Amino acid sequence: MTAEERNAIEQHLKGIVLNLPEKPGSYQYYDDTGTIIYVGKAKNLKRRVASYFNKDQQSSKTRMLVSKIRNITYTVVNSEEDALLLENSLIKQYRPRYNVLLKDDKTYPSIAITKEYLPRIFPTRHIDRKGATYYGPYSHVPTMHALLDLCRRLYHPRPCHTPMSQEGVESGKYDVCLDYHIHKCAAPCVGKQSHTDYMANIEACREILKGNTRDVARRLREEMTQLAAEMRFEEAQALKQKYDLIENFRAKSEVISNVSYDIDVFSIESAEKVAYINFLHVVNGAITQSFTFEFKKRLDESDADLLALGIVEMRKRFDSHSKEIVLPFPIELPENYATQVVPQQGGKKTLLDLSRQNVLQYKFDRLKQAEKLNPEQKQVRLMKEIQTQLGLPKLPIHIELFDNSNISGEDAVAACVVFERLKPAKKRYRKFNIKTVIGPDDYASMREVVERRYSRLVEENDTLPDLIIADGGKGQMEAIRSVVVDKLHLDIPIAGLAKDSRHRTREMLFGDPPISVAVKPDSTLFHLLTRMQDEVHRFAITFHRQKRSKRQVASELDLVKGIGEKTKALLLSRLGSVKKIKSASLPELQAVIGEKRGESLYEQLHTEGKA
């Protein structure tokens, strides 16, 4: 596109923006094919749309969106609430490329109560508002079946599918079926149950489906008490059985509080590319709906914007008209839409905590599911987390860790372990004998090893690490930095893993001067760092033990004539230690290395002992 064409487009869009009304409404952006690529809402259309073209405030994603805009249309509405609802409707209709995408498009089942002379109650995924009243939808299908089962066991709505009219019942058109004989139906179709009684049962079912189980139980108890007072014990017993059924159901359902809350509760957990929102619908203090859904981000949407969009979507989907909404933080909603509450304590805070627990569990489950389908995704996620926590310029694909090991300066060694994509690359592990340091000086040993390691990599033009981690705190980090940065002039980030008094990983350090990085001790990343630290420590200790063992063996057996490396190895593998070799009898030594060599070894060891 030429500069003239670009300028013509900008002038065209500027003309539209200048003429936008300062009223609430929804605006739509179009690309060069005439396709809607973004839908938004605004209290003030002119001010909101103009903000997209303020280059000083544009993010990279917004700049990308603006570069695609070729036309703008808008719809004026009467209120902010109407703008919010219209935005939600247009997003679902056009699914614009740059709007957040609700990833859940499932049709969840509802419970229908038909508008017949003798209404039926059944589950369905097909909504026909003219023919029935619907309750739900139910994201948790077992909950729906539990409610249906409760209604059927308590009130026996007819299970047949036959359309029935008042004329048909009064004319004797219908016959008694098997359901009556097995006590699943009271046969209102043939007059064995009155129409008034049947409709009272249907109304009771409506109350149960609305979540008013507490009121239903209370009325049953009152009727039962009245019947007992009138000495009508058989009828009272029948009501008691119903009362016990509904109380058992209430005990199993999640009743949060004795306070009769009728509220909606929302919480949000946001990640880089998606946001998860949990919705709890509470009636009379009991949760009747619990649903977590997922929005795929397209621009730099804030949690407040996403939560507002989610609230409108879920309340519309579940047909909620609760006058109060419980939220983790206040958001911008139309003034008359609902009362916002951000609780700090009490029953509503308990509900909000439960909602957050649900959204965190959903996020964790989605993460685990994705990692099973793509095992490398976990490594990438953790590398991104390290990159974010430390502010690294690129993903730490290649990480190297160092550790020293010695006893009072004796047999001093060091080790370097390498992790590629957070997995041990054991072929690239390296061992170092300390050559220039005398005595127990860990910092000097670290400087020697690091200089040998990276001088060689630079000389051989080999791959340098994206991150160096010291098995230690500030002192070890500074020892590495003095060589890598000050002496070799390499730009490699350096971190440290400090331990507590029990030699357990306590914290991660980074920066100059080093400061503690906020990695939660119960997080996956912290456990990974602990395993990495344990691995370099294991490798260094193993090498140190090997060297110490070799020196000890050399001090005892290298002075014996006629005993070479293979014979020493054979003796140690069979007898276990130098001490056991020295205490072995002549026949035992001869059994291992032969008659003559065994006799020679026995004489030299015991002659030396007598001397």
Image: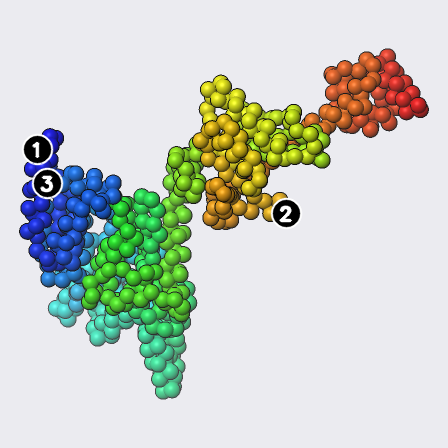
Q: Please, which colouring scheme is shown?
A: rainbow
Residue type, mark 2 in image: Arg
- Mark 2 or mark 3, whichever is nearer to me: 3
* Mark 1 vs 3, N-terminal side: 1
Position of the N terminus, as image quadrant, is: top left
Question: In the figure, 556 relative to 184: above or below?
Answer: above
Q: Identify the residue under disc 2.
A: 502
Question: How packed is label 2: few (under 14 Cα within 10 Å), some, or many (20 or more)?
Answer: few
Give the residue displayed 7% in from the left and 41% down from the top: 11
Taking the image as shown, residue 253 lies to the left or right of residue 114, namely: right
* Mark 2 vs 3, N-terminal side: 3
Q: Is residue 42 visible?
A: yes
Residue 577: image x %, image y %?
A: 78, 28
Distance between the alpha carbons at the discs numbered 2 and 3: 66 Å
Residue type, mark 3 in image: Glu
Q: Secondary structure at mark 3?
A: helix
Give the residue displayed 19% in from the left and 53% down from the top: 88
Residue type, mark 1 in image: Glu
Residue 206: image x %, image y %?
A: 26, 68
Q: Is residue 33 visible?
A: no
Taking the image as shown, residue 575 lies to the left or right of residue 101, namely: right
Residue 343: image x %, image y %?
A: 36, 66
Residue 122: image x %, image y %?
A: 25, 59
Position of the C terminus, as image quadrant, is: top right
Query: Which disc is residue 10 wearing?
Result: 3
Question: For residue 332, what is the image quadrant?
Answer: bottom left
Query: Which disc is residue 4 wearing?
Result: 1
Distance between the alpha carbons at the discs numbered 1 and 2: 70 Å
Question: In the figure, 124 relative to 271: above or below?
Answer: below
Q: Secondary structure at mark 2?
A: loop
Give the residue displayed 90% in from the left and 18% down from the top: 603
